[in-house]
Amino acid sequence: MRAPLVIVGDSLLDVDLDGHADRLCPDAPVPVVNVDDEWLRPGGAGLAAALATRSTPDVALVTAIADDETGGRLARLLGEVAEVVPVPLAGGTVCKCRVRVGGQSLLRMDSGDGHVERAPLDARVHRVLDAAGAVLVSDYGRGITANPELRERLTELARHIPVVWDPHPAGAAPIPGTRLVTPNEAEARRLSEDTSGSVADVAARLRRTWRCDGVAVTLGADGALLAAAGTTQTIPVSAGARERAGGAHADTCGAGDRFASAAAAALLTGAGTESAVTTAVDSAARFVAAGGATGLSLKTPDLPAQQATSPGSAESAFDVAERVRRDGGTVVATGGCFDLLHPGHVRLLERARELGDALIVCLNSDRSVRRLKGDGRPIVTERDRAWLLLAMAAVDAVVIFDEPAPAAVLDGLRPDVWVKGGDYDPDTLPEAAVVRGYGGRIEALPLVGDYSTTRLAATAAGTQPPQEAT
């Protein structure tokens, strides 16, 4: 059994308030945002831990959470992804709240004054660190990296196992002997106090200052620059990943956490530093292409609110996928609106189920359907559409997603086979890069009959349907 990856760092709660704005405030030229949904996810080291589970199964998180309402919400989220080992926190749990309209952030509101106390570490922290196969330090400037006892322990560990350090300008310096430090370019320049030199010079200077084996400065769509063993090299994003991740509206929130967690997981398995950075560049690019950190968000108040389960079953779609894979089976998934189920839908689902051992349906939420089809749709609510699908013998689970395409959900589910109707070109699907990126395959099944929800709805309403069926 492989030793666990231990994440040490400052955790916080990330909240996205998604809404719509169609007017300005009467007393100031600012938009009035009507909030439609609230989404929660772990942030900081908590996000790094959640992302690390995509690369390695055994993850522990040493972090601090206050005993307050925000801390309670964060603790419930973290309990879903990792073993949490607490350290003392003075003050309130930190919360970062983004207000978004149409997928674009209007502002961010931060709250919480929590700071990790420099208290002695309890025995449980030492036990977890003793068992670690690798450590990722995820510093968000809230004091955990300044704990003298922890720094001494990490310095000792770095002599025997890989330690990756994701730094913060307000945090403590990486301990000597760190295998890899992963600042982004802005952080690297601020930490080196060099605003005009080349990135290669900055990385080399930081490596000398920190006495670490390597520094990988992340460069967004341009990959990363690695300074190690007296040399520097740029490790680029692959052409396919660059095309998917480099859009003007790509949400890069959490990309640095994905980079650091993927690098640490690769080092855990024995990869060299260059190989680990190459893996991390690819993982971060695919993460952004799949929608970024929003793919880990859960709608309040229920956790997990976007997962529908079969009657009498507590298994979510992700539980089903994990169980089938554990038993050596094949996971099949398909997706769509499935508004007004018709024989074409039924036959597609039956044929998709024949391709494996379980079928998971990725279902567009009501809001997603409205964005795709217009204000008159859906006709049937997401809750009722999910339950109708679950009543079918061919369907094992349903997961509801809010984006136009299910790329983020697929990056978490990772089905072996992704099925679409024959009216789609597999090469042009928005989610194609994600499915192929983790090794899945795409099957386009021929459509059965000339069925269309749009025509059915128009016929029922006594109106003329549009020329293009939907």
Image (cartoon, rainbow, N blue to C red):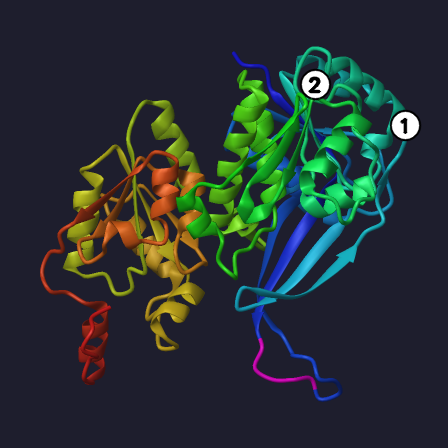
Element on which disc 2 rests = helix
Q: Which mark is residue 119?
A: 1
Magenta span: predominant SS is: loop
Q: Circle 1 sits in a helix, a strand or a loop, which is it?
A: loop
Classify residue 16 by image quadrant. Answer: bottom right
Question: Can you say whether 340 is above or below 333 in the image?
Answer: below
Residue 4, above or below 62: above
Q: Point out the tag, 2 or 1, that comes first from the N-terminus.
A: 1
Magenta range: 21-25
Front residue of 404 and 157: 157
Which circle marks residue 72 in the picture? Answer: none
Q: Residue at 65% of width from left, 79% of height from top?
A: 31
Disc 2 packing (10 Å; few <14; some 14–19; many ≥20): some
Residue 437 x/y as whole percent: 38, 38
Where on the picture, by quarter, is residue 45?
top right
**In this rendering, does residue 82 appear at all?**
yes
Whether 435 is drawn above or below 29: the answer is: above
